[in-house]
Image: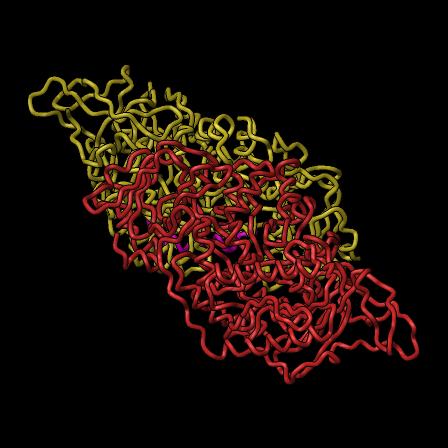
Chain colours: A red, B yellow
Amino acid sequence: MSKDRAAGKPRPWADMATELVDVAMGRKPADLVVRNGRWVNVHSGEIIPGTDIAVSGGRFAYCGPDASHAIGDDTIVVDAAGRYLAPGLCDAHMHVESGMVTVTEFCRAVIPHGTTSMFIDPHEIANVLGLPGVRLMHDEAMAMPVNVHVQMPSCVPSAPGLENAGAQLTVDDVREAMTWPNIIGLGEVMNFPGVAANDPVMSGEIAETVRAGKTVGGHYASPDLGLPFHGYVAGGPEDDHEGTRADDAIARVRLGLKAMLRLGSAWYDVAEQVKAVTEQGIDPRNFILCTDDSHSGTLVNEGHMDRVVRHAIAQGLKPVTAIQMATLNTAQHFRLERELGSIAPGRLADFLVVSDLAAMKIDAVYARGQLVAKDGRLEIDIPAYDYPLEAKNTVRLGKRLAATDFDIAAPAGANSVRARVIGVIENQAPTRALEADLGVADGLVAMDREGDVCQIALVERHRGTGGVTNAFVSGFGYTEDCAIASSVAHDSHHIIVVGTNKNDMALAANRLAEVGGGVVLYSKGRELALVEMPIAGLMSDERAEIVAEKAERLVEAMQQMGCTLNNAYMQHSLLALVVIPELRISDIGLVDVRTFERVELFV
Amino acid sequence: MSKDRAAGKPRPWADMATELVDVAMGRKPADLVVRNGRWVNVHSGEIIPGTDIAVSGGRFAYCGPDASHAIGDDTIVVDAAGRYLAPGLCDAHMHVESGMVTVTEFCRAVIPHGTTSMFIDPHEIANVLGLPGVRLMHDEAMAMPVNVHVQMPSCVPSAPGLENAGAQLTVDDVREAMTWPNIIGLGEVMNFPGVAANDPVMSGEIAETVRAGKTVGGHYASPDLGLPFHGYVAGGPEDDHEGTRADDAIARVRLGLKAMLRLGSAWYDVAEQVKAVTEQGIDPRNFILCTDDSHSGTLVNEGHMDRVVRHAIAQGLKPVTAIQMATLNTAQHFRLERELGSIAPGRLADFLVVSDLAAMKIDAVYARGQLVAKDGRLEIDIPAYDYPLEAKNTVRLGKRLAATDFDIAAPAGANSVRARVIGVIENQAPTRALEADLGVADGLVAMDREGDVCQIALVERHRGTGGVTNAFVSGFGYTEDCAIASSVAHDSHHIIVVGTNKNDMALAANRLAEVGGGVVLYSKGRELALVEMPIAGLMSDERAEIVAEKAERLVEAMQQMGCTLNNAYMQHSLLALVVIPELRISDIGLVDVRTFERVELFV
């Protein structure tokens, strides 16, 4: 197999069909033949022992009982020794930025876990850098040795009028992006009230995507399955990954959407929803697995789509059904059934050698016919992608912050106040809109460490306005003097600071301005952990293992401060996400996401 | 509901999404609301009682428990009274010409049977009139009140070198046709040895179709599932309807093809192949039902896709699974999942009101939101489509034939001969390559009426060459003096004459030249039955009922002549199909379709 050819994207099937036919017929030797595998056939739903596959030019040419006729002098022959041959896994919806690393580093981290196709929505960088940011990740994605397809972000800002992001995307931007070579569709349409209200930006973006023949990603983050849900579906989104209950999945599938079930670092939405299949007998063909958001630490320590498939099998799905949900179903959804997602003639030769199917023990990963990982280790080099300077200078505070920037003044003369408090819910994206009675000292509202109420601040960082929005949050359980600041702050990506000590809050925010963004923890004036993310303030330019190590140090530091949450940092970074109920913070104030209205801090 | 709008094709979903959203949300009344149905949900695989649907502008706007909010003063409200609401049925591969009627008349005949989408391959007319003939049917199809999508014929002539048709289609023709608005893909690629041999016309046509993002229809008519099959699949065809055994279906599905199971007038390929699902547990998602070829009589007396679905259910499929095979699976295959094939928001409002699901008893048929048939009767008018004169003057014999044109001279001095004989197989398309010892009288080979060996002739009719190919056939069982001539003579559509009497053979062929084509039966110099088909010599311009009546008269006459075959006329018309084994006749002679070689009449 030519190294040069394997490194690039194979020619389209239609352009090389005669070569594949020649190999299938035995008139030309294959580049690679794998013998004696158990074919995990996602088309038929079977496991077929005694299968050989032959690969030529990065695509499958032959899949059947005997490929000896395709073996020539230069053919690489691999003995699968009865192990399973499964299609490479697909992550149907995910944000690379959540791994805090570049696309390149993300690929390096997930390829050994069997992921060979990703559908990435770079809407974090879009919120910081706009369309040029999307193009950067689009171009980086095209250079990868696996399939990284890009969804054009649809909602930047996520909630117009409720936040100001670093950029804004328009219908014209979507129309333009649909002409790019590596755009697979529209990213999750999160403004679901906008769709149901016929917001012209939402309906315009959807229409441009449909006219381009591409897939419209959905995001309906409400438990209400009544008219707003039906109105949203009539507007055109084709999938949704925001369901949490079996009934959510069923409602989506009934109306012709794909139910995307996610298992991310902080999302645990597979187990409940997959009961629609395992308990209620719903046809699994319209179910798709995805991660949405994965920490580097999750990638390095737990895995990626292998973890999701393993988990889905553990919930009672047949292995081949779970694998369909991470291969064929995904490919079909994105109109790529003839290109990837199965081991069948003509498709990209992306496949896994698996020694234990239910456990998804992956011994080897092949992408485009090339061995790319073995025994959990990457076997190829993926050169780093150079991000330009303007992508690395995005944290602009406008001033050096002081502790007093985080003072919350009580109403004149009040001895105590009843304040709205953002309530973090363990393992879930939605928050609760809580209320708490808080004391007042020297005219300032006091935090309540015993009651687990500390401060949260949204620090503007795109335009250097110096703006700081202050509010309260509960659920982290911080017992020490500390502050955590993050320039990853979905979706507008200002800086979220959560702290029990205002001096630490100021230090933490200022530190991020120095390093170009990231996440940092201060306690009593000392920096205990830092993950630098200079690319758009969202991504590190270091290796995933190093980022994971630094992030792990951060998690440990958060635990030392008393925090007991799983994925505490991800919870932290979502507190400005003004599209998921119930209560969030943005640069314009507190937002009640049940009503999509700004609300006052005090009740 | 506006009559004008309902008559035309609804606007694309993307262009009218805001209207659908308005109806779903209760801000705008629907055109039509159907209440209290049992939703046959092909996405989830469920039957959901208590379902209302609301339709606007020809598309579903709402499907759920209560559409009362969508009812306005002018909304037509229908009470389904607990009956089933099923998607309109799709015929995934069929030839209108086999019904001997125009597209218009075909639609009139099948709409009451619940067929609202057809994927037609006009390769009969293409063999007579070439690309302009395809365009005629393409344009007629677009004028229909149901969805008639056209597959561009791929193999005209079917077997280059083995026959001369009335026209020839090229790779350039395919490229041009792919730009037409109503071309859904490439019609069955019948030259399967050509694909496996990398014939440049075959691979070129497939490549043009794939580049246009359309579906490549397959046709692999061989029991050999070895390398030639694998080579064919590697070449790019996406479906196949030529399988007959469960193993055929499984082999196709495993390699990523859709197994199309057909029940036509003379095809009975569902029962055996569906065992792949019912007995061997193969995932049914890649199985699709079709008819391929239906007589007018079958349409009028037995039905169309309702008959196929009913039959599939009777083989043990769950009703919803069988309906998936005739709706969602088909729509997905042709990249139309978002357009048709299910009752779900945004899709064309093509649906059936069914009072008995297993029996497929269809009480009403709606297409694009309009009631088009009720209790088996058409409720709308479909104006006849005017075919131009040049499409009606296609039978050119070049001379008036005489009985002597059908003389078969024995080798000089022979008293008897051993001749090749085409053996008709009841209910199957393949023939047998038989041999028979025949007597010689006056230097001419004699037929053997006791041994059921009579004559067959292929009379050239496209260029008026006066050519007549004579040979022998067995299996019809004719016991009387008679001849049957047909200008429907797949695929090159010369005239096939089968007879026990040469004078009747000449009379029959000459009669077809007079009426512009069709099928006629003569016995002892008298015309006993005639179906005129002046359009390309393939289709009548009369109503399907009348054609069916005339065809029934023909069948009766064939039976009176001693023929005992089911669908004897269809068997007759397939005897020149030089792509299906074993022995066929063409204008160049006898063809052995096992080896794709011309063979001598005498052994």
Q: Residue furthest left?
A: B413
The answer to whether residue B109 shows anywhere in this view is no
Q: Is residue B310 left or right of residue A371?
A: right
> In this orientation, which residue lies closer to the viewer: A185 or B42?
A185
Q: Please state the horizontal and vertical placement of residue B425, each as a whole percent of the image.
A: 34, 24
Q: Residue at x 14, y 27 (%)?
A: B409
Q: Residue furthest top?
A: B450
Q: Is residue B403 left or right of residue A38?
A: left
| Quarter containing the C terminus of chain A | bottom right
> In this orientation, which residue lies closer to the viewer: A405 or B305?
A405
Q: Is residue A15 left or right of residue A545?
A: left
> In this orientation, which residue lies closer to the viewer: B453 or A543?
A543
> In this orientation, which residue lies closer to the viewer: A1 or A192?
A1
Magenta highlight on residue B138: yes
Magenta highlight on residue A461: no
Q: Is residue A405 left or right of residue A519?
A: right
The number of callouts visible is 0
Vertical placement of residue B342 versus B550, above or below: below
Q: Quadrant of residue A448?
A: bottom right
Q: Please state the horizontal and vertical placement of residue B386, each as a whole percent of the image.
A: 46, 54
Q: Residue at x 56, y 50 (%)?
A: B340
> Which stretch did the figure color magenta?
B126-145
Vertical placement of residue B488 versus B166, above or below: above
Vertical placement of residue A176 versus B252, above or below: below
Q: Main secondary structure of the magenta part?
A: helix
The answer to whether residue A124 shows anywhere in this view is yes
Q: Please state the horizontal and vertical placement of residue A340, each as a whole percent of the image.
A: 42, 50
Q: Please state the horizontal and vertical placement of residue A480, each as a whole percent of the image.
A: 72, 64
